[in-house]
């Protein structure tokens, strides 16, 4: 008798986990943008905590995005390899959600 109670509790927990997984996926997919970049396109990269170039820079005052970088190649379906415009250094693959398109600033003169 105790085995049947344990088995039903286990099945109930599995069902609840599956329902929670589906709800979390729906919630995530609502805000997901399907962004693709072409090779050679300029992008900005999110400046996450701990990646500030200056050791005295505080995250609150640091730039939210750094760059521009140039897309070198696509690695997998969601990662891109970037090349620095300043020194030509190649960055390790960066996830697409950490990138945004770079728009040239037009001069006011």
Image: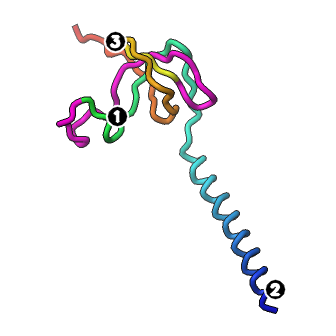
Q: Is residue 3 left or right of residue 16?
A: right
Give the numbered dot on residue 83: none
**Quarter where residue 13 is shown:** bottom right
Percent coordinates x, y for residue 98 in the rendering: 45, 34
The CA span between labels 2 and 3 is 67 Å
The residue that label 3 is drawn on is: 87
Q: Residues within 10 Å of mark 1 (few under 14, many from 20)?
A: some
Residue at 67% across, 58% down: 22
**Quarter where residue 6 is shown:** bottom right
- Where 70 falls versus 13 (above or below)? above
Q: Which residues lie in the magenta part?
A: 54-80
Percent coordinates x, y for residue 57 in the rendering: 20, 36
Residue farthest front in this picture = 3
Q: Residues within 10 Å of mark 3 (few under 14, many from 20)?
A: few
Q: Is residue 27 magenta?
A: no
Q: Secondary structure at mark 2?
A: helix
Percent coordinates x, y for residue 89 in the rendering: 39, 16
The residue that label 1 is drawn on is: 47
- Where 70 falls versus 45 (above or below)? above
Q: Nearer the viewer, mark 1 or mark 2?
A: 2
Residue at 26% across, 29% down: 53
Q: Secondary structure at mark 3?
A: loop
The CA span between labels 1 and 3 is 18 Å
The residue that label 2 is drawn on is: 4
- Where 91 falls versus 27 (above or below)? above
- Mark positioned earlier in the residue sequence (1 or 2): 2
Q: Secondary structure at mark 1?
A: loop
Residue at 46% across, 20% down: 82
């Amino acid at each position: 008798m105790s085995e049947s109670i344990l088995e039903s509790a286990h099945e109930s927990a599995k069902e609840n986990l599956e329902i929670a997984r589906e709800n979390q996926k729906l919630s995530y997919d609502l805000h997901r943008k399907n962004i693709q970049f072409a090779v050679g396109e300029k992008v900005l990269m999110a400046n996450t905590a701990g990646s500030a170039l200056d050791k005295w820079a505080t995250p609150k005052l640091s730039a939210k995005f750094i760059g521009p970088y140039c897309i070198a190649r696509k690695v997998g379906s969601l990662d891109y390899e970037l090349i620095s415009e300043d020194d030509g250094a190649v960055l390790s693959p960066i996830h697409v959600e950490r990138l945004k398109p770079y728009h040239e600033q037009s001069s006011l003169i």
